[in-house]
Amino acid sequence: MNGFAFYDLITHCTQKSDSGETILSASKTKPADNVRAIRWEASTLTLLDQRRLPGEVIYRDYVDAVDIATAIHDMVVRGAPAIGITAAYGVVLAARKAYTKDPQAWQTLIQPDLDSLASSRPTAVNLHWALERMQSLFAGISGDPEPVLLQAAKDIHAEDVAANQAMGEVGAGIIGQCRAVLTHCNTGSLATGGYGTALGVIRSAYRRGNLQMVYVDETRPWLQGTRLTTWELMQDNIPVTLLADCAANYLMSRGEIEWVIVGADRIAANGDVANKIGTYGLAVAARHHSIRVMVVAPVSTFDLGIADGSHIPIEDRGPYEILQCGGHLIAPGGVNTWNPVFDVTPAGLIDVIVSEKGAIQAPDRQKIKALLV
Ligand code: MRU
């Protein structure tokens, strides 16, 4: 299965766009796991603009929490753990602004910015987990809050990378020798602090020499698979084959893959998993073809306050994403649309959930509680 060598068309130089943004071209030969979507440098949050990949690698600087909330909403940064880390740095900047305005009242003044961050996207629970962890420090802070909060945000960021590396080892151990896997959406360094969840397992398995091919579906309508996962795997020289979403069932029927490996945006107490729209269909098809399904997610993705998946809020991103393709309208004007961007896969269709605390085979309420509580 040969792919169009789009990547070879990317120019290999540094440029400035008309609006003055720095555009760094992609390189074909970077060392493995070189991609980072979130950086804190010189008192500023820098995000890799994922809306522009794979054609342009553009970093944007942020010093205001409301702009960060907009960046999360608009998908400059996306992926559950990455959203949580970004929000944590957003709290640092919100606290700086509030403290500069009034050092005595910063804990009150910060509230509107916290509300903006909290409402930026609804499904990934990592966002709320990170905000709660940051807010839990407020009561113990006297004086300038920035040093304490910045250290906490950096800790959240570093812990996420460490969790991903740990999950990579656990997951790679479970899949063992494996000819090929299918993954959905983007769960890699772009979606996390680094290394990735499902893509971290894939990275670890490939490094062990246990995996020969990664199949990636398009992940319509935002095309995280087409645009991001292919790019990230090519950066790290991991063999990847892109397929249309609707080709996944046929791939399974031909016996081409042994595992479907995905991430999660929220896992309910009973093991139901909210993840990128299309995950549920892949899990149904995988069960039909006796292909195993692995969900890879850090403990910050579990929401034990939600009994089952039916209570998970599912984001609807409106009509535009499905009315257009590549910026061109492709549907007749006035057509009704429905664009839920996540779905819920019942725990019964999942063979194993991998977290940094260990793996849960055939997940259920009791096993999840035993591992996490
Ligand atoms: O809408 P997105 O791109 O933020 O959705 C991302 C996903 O659904 C990922 O699969 C999920 O966040 C797990 S990523 C580590």
Image (tube, rainbow, N blue to C red):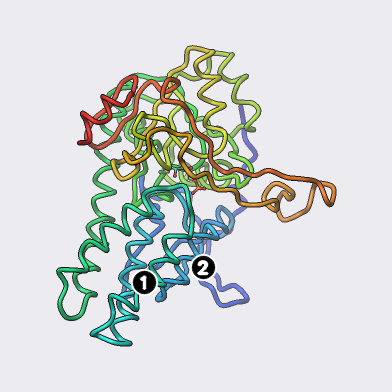
- Is 28 situated above or below 306? below
Residue occupied by mark 1: 111
Q: Quadrant where the C terminus lies?
A: top left
Q: Position of residue 218 (x, y in %)?
A: 60, 38
In the image, taking residue 335 as reference, residue 233 lies left or right, namely left
Q: Position of residue 225 (x, y in %)?
A: 55, 41
Q: Position of residue 264 (x, y in %)?
A: 42, 38
Residue occupied by mark 2: 14
Report crowding for label 1: few under 14, some 14 to 19, many 20 or more residues within 10 A (C-alpha): some
At a point 35% along the width and 24% down the height, the residue shown is: 352
Q: Position of residue 134 (x, y in %)?
A: 26, 62
Q: Nearer the viewer, residue 8 or 359?
A: 359
**Front label number (2 vs 1):** 1
At a point 64% along the width and 33% down the height, the residue shown is: 244
Count every numbered label the image shows and give the total. Answer: 2
Q: Quadrant where the N terminus lies?
A: top right
* Mark earlier in primary sequence (2, 1): 2
In the image, taking residue 227 as reference, residue 198 lies left or right, namely left
